[in-house]
């Protein structure tokens, strides 16, 4: 299977399916259907079958999906059967919340190092972490081999910090800063600017 | 122009254009091009022209876009030329961060009321707000006419709180809880689960 051939939009739905499958599994079920899964995520059963068929045969007509098997397959496809160490840059309210966030465990991620450029914060404690100086980003991240970062700095600092993360070898950024980042080809960015999320909905309101 | 005719995917890009235009405006420029705008958001100039053409004629071939005019038009299309009051439910780390977030001003939103169900938090202060009891959601939100909410409660409580928000008349939810929500037709949900954002990128990593 060639990665280039599977559209981004399909990949973007797989984590939603995975999360829903775990939820259904948590209810004690062993088998699910594309109908049940679809109802729980608001996506049509046909779309789900089509999406999953890109990666192989995960269920049989009439018998449904073995939940544990499908979860394992999706984790492997998304490469979250392993645990990725993640750097968090910017220890304001949002970075603070992410450094202490309990929701990453069991979903493939672990915050491993946190940075800030404020002398009043550097060396201090956030959750289990001692805050490192952003000046150490390149050396510390290179040393640890971290490929994933969450960016929670103000917009004005975001591109500069991104450049450091690129130099450090980071390949994926979850960006909370309210600005579009410029990154080299092959580097992924996902944007979690809350104002953008809100503005995507107000268009539809009366 | 019929709202049903414009695909969601186009609407979802407009806030990105708006944010980038403001950034370019902040650099002191008065005129921009689809090329410049495209470079700053990582979207092709042709796509931007096509997206904007859905809503009218905003620029002329060869002269570019008047930035102030295009910003005003986009704000009007997205209905963020006004200010929407927003409720935040769940005063954990993430809700706390959102209640204090400075990035909503000037982008169409203002946190107006915050809720939690923890007796230790109810009546306490978060930022400028006194934390209200989640039991008051329906009456308080109905009274204030709020249509937009940010949901920061644990996954196990998210659907129950969503049901209250629906009863209160909320029509748009920015959901930080790691769970798909079931909402009636006509209600919009945007998901900001950080693990989903991360899982959408690891697929592409080596």
Image (spheres, coloured by chain):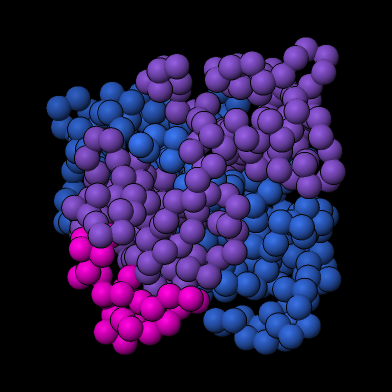
Chain colours: A purple, B blue
Residue A144 percent location from the top left of the image? 31, 59
Residue A203 percent location from the top left of the image? 55, 42
- Of B178 and B6, nearer the camera is B178
Query: Can residue A177 be seen?
Result: no
Going by the image, does A117 lie left or right of A105?
Answer: left
Q: Quadrant of residue A42?
A: top right
Q: Quadrant of residue A64?
A: top right
- Tell me which residue sits at (77%, 60%) in the image: B157
- Of A57 and A10, nearer the camera is A57
With respect to residue A66, does B22 lie above or below? Answer: below
Going by the image, does B92 lie left or right of A123?
Answer: right
Asked if the stretch drawn in magenta spans residue A120, the answer is yes
- Of B118 and B163, nearer the camera is B118
Name the quarter where the C terminus of chain A is drawn.
top right
Residue B132 percent location from the top left of the image? 73, 77
Question: Which residues, given as a range, are shown in magenta?
Answer: A115-141
- Tell me which residue sits at (76%, 78%) in the image: B118
Name the quarter where the N terminus of chain A is drawn.
top left
């Amino acid at each position: 299977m060639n990665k280039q051939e599977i559209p981004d939009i399909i990949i973007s739905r797989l984590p939603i399916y995975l999360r829903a499958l775990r939820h259904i599994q948590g209810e004690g079920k062993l088998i699910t259907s594309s109908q049940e899964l679809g109802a729980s995520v608001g996506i049509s059963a046909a779309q789900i079958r089509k999406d999953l068929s890109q990666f192989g045969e995960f269920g049989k007509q009439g018998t449904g999906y073995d939940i544990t098997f499908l979860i394992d397959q999706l984790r492997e496809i998304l490469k979250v059967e392993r645990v990725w160490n993640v750097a968090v840059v910017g220890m304001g309210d949002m970075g603070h919340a992410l450094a202490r966030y309990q929701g990453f465990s069991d979903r493939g991620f672990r915050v491993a190092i946190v940075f800030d450029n404020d002398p009043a914060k550097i060396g201090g404690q956030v959750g289990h972490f001692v805050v490192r100086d952003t000046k150490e980003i390149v050396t510390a991240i290179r040393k640890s081999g971290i490929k994933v970062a969450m960016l929670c700095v103000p917009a004005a600092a975001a591109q500069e910090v991104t450049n450091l993360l690129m130099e450090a070898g980071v390949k994926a950024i979850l960006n909370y800063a309210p600005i579009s980042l410029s990154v080299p080809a092959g580097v992924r960015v996902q944007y979690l600017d809350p104002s953008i999320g809100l503005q995507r909905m107000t268009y539809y309101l009366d």
